[in-house]
Image: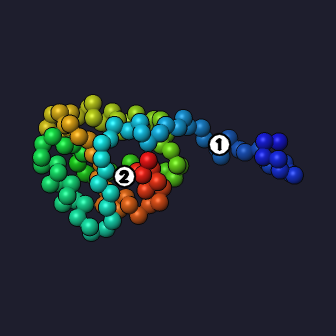
Amino acid sequence: SVLDLPFMLPQPMPEQVEFNELSHWSKLDLDFVIAGVDNCGTTSLGKAIHSLGSVGFSNQGNEDEFFFNHDCMLPYATEVESFNSQWRSCNSQTVSDCRLRGLRNPVIFVHPRVRIALSR
């Protein structure tokens, strides 16, 4: 047995099994994250940086919930591709001409999994 358990585990039901290819946080087309806690000025800071013109934010500048899709330590490959594709599909008014690409979320820093991902 793989786990060297003294007993047999039951075979999972098909609806209990899910397979997803994993990716890595470094694969995100992202230069920076504004990680906040409630009422710390994340929204104001994000709007001020966005007004510089050469900086763009994911989710069209709105709060991005990307890191909260699930509780796995690594993102799914499909999520990374979807996240990165937003930079290719935006018009010049938002992010396609931006030199820096960011994400902002006012409560992102309170989640330990997100802090681990952002620290690497």
- Give the image location of residue 32, x and y in percent: 30, 47
Instruction: Look at label 2 and name its amino acid.
Output: Glu
The residue under label 1 is 17
The reply to whether residue 59 is in sight is: no
Q: Which residue is drawn at 23% across and 48% down?
A: 61
Q: What element carries label 2?
A: loop
Marks 2 and 1, how far apart at CA: 25 Å
Count of all numbered marks drawn on residues in the image: 2
Q: Which residue is drawn at 20% across and 33% down?
A: 96
Where residue 83 sits, quadrant-wise, is: top left
For residue 5, which numbered disc appears in the image?
Answer: none
Mark 1 residue crowding within 10 angstroms, few (<14) / some (14–19) / many (20+): few
Q: Residue at x 80, y 49 (%)?
A: 9
Q: Which of marks 2 and 1 is nearer the N terminus?
A: 1
Where residue 41 sits, quadrant-wise, is: bottom left
Q: Which residue lies furthest to the top in this view?
A: 88
- Give the image location of residue 14, x and y in percent: 68, 41
**In the displayed structure, does residue 80 sit left or right of residue 57?**
right
- Give the image location of residue 10, x and y in percent: 79, 48
Say which quadrant the N terminus sits in: top right
Q: Is mark 1 on a helix, strand or loop?
A: loop
Where residue 57 sits, quadrant-wise, is: top left
Q: Is residue 83 above or below residue 37?
A: above
Instruction: Look at label 1 and name its amino acid.
Output: Val
The residue under label 2 is 65
**In the displayed structure, does residue 97 sit left or right of residue 70?**
left
Q: Residue furthest bottom?
A: 39
Kindly check if marks 2 and 1 are in contact, taking CB atoms under 8 A apart as contact: no
- Give the image location of residue 77, x and y in percent: 47, 35
